[in-house]
Image (cartoon, helix red, strand yellow):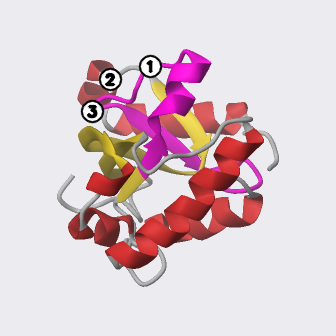
Amino acid sequence: MTPIDTDAVKAMWHAYAAANPVRAQLFDTYEAEQFGDSAEMADDLLGLILGGRKRATSSHATEYRDDGDPFPQIGSHWVSCDGRGEPRAIRRIVELRVAPFMAVDAQFAYDEGEDNRTLESWRREHRRFFDRTCAARGTTFSENDELILERFAVVWPPEVADSAD
């Protein structure tokens, strides 16, 4: 993937903060990210977000621990970038829990919005993804591994923001 355009991310954040000063002041930090492990996957998943179908995501807790990064928090903001590193949306975490891979339920799989939205396809495709990303880090994925399960609202830009947020 192309590196994230940090200047464009800052510009998007400043536009959001100017339109939402109270919320931006309460949560004055943000992270920028690209979904997945390829530009194509980043674009596909971002398309699901922009289209309103994807309102949840999962990540491998060990990755945060190994990198020494804090877990996301409810209320935190994430700037989602496409595969070319351009910011396209700001998400705000509205629900968060840590659970083993096998504890993910059908509703969460549906809310992730991927494939045919069933728990069976979620487990199959996420198992493939976590196997691949763990192998790239020199580790092995286990279905007992903990995941960070997030539900989020899209808050910016206005043309794709969730109306209730």
Circle nearer the viewer, 2 or 3: 3
Q: Position of residue 93 (x, y in %)?
A: 31, 41
Q: Which residues are magenta?
A: 58-87
Residue position marked by numbered label 1 in the rendering: 70
| Residue 98: mark | none
Left or right: 64, with 19 as reference point: right
Q: Position of residue 31 (x, y in %)?
A: 52, 30
Residue position marked by numbered label 2 in the rendering: 27
Q: Residue furthest bottom?
A: 116
Q: Residue furthest left?
A: 164
Alpha-carbon neighbours of circle 2 within 10 Å: few (<14), some, or many (≥20)?
some
Badge 1 amino acid: Pro
Cα separation between marks 2 and 3: 7 Å
Cα separation between marks 1 and 3: 14 Å
> Is residue 14 positioned above or below 107 on the image?
above
Residue drawn where x is 61% and y is 58% of the image: 129
**Residue nearer the viewer, 8 or 103:** 103
Mark 2 or mark 3: which comes first in sequence? 2
Is residue 36 something that shows in the picture?
no
Query: Which type of secondary structure does the marked residue at label 1 adopt?
Result: loop
Left or right: 152, with 62 as reference point: left
Is residue 127 something that shows in the picture?
yes
Residue position marked by numbered label 3 in the rendering: 75
Mark 1 or mark 3: which comes first in sequence? 1
Badge 3 amino acid: Gly
Do the numbered discs 2 and 3 sit on residues whose CB atoms are within 8 Å? yes
Residue drawn where x is 62% and y is 37% of the image: 9
Q: Residue furthest top?
A: 68
Q: Position of residue 21 (x, y in %)?
A: 30, 28
Query: Which type of secondary structure does the marked residue at label 3 adopt?
Result: loop
Residue drawn where x is 40% and y is 42% of the image: 147
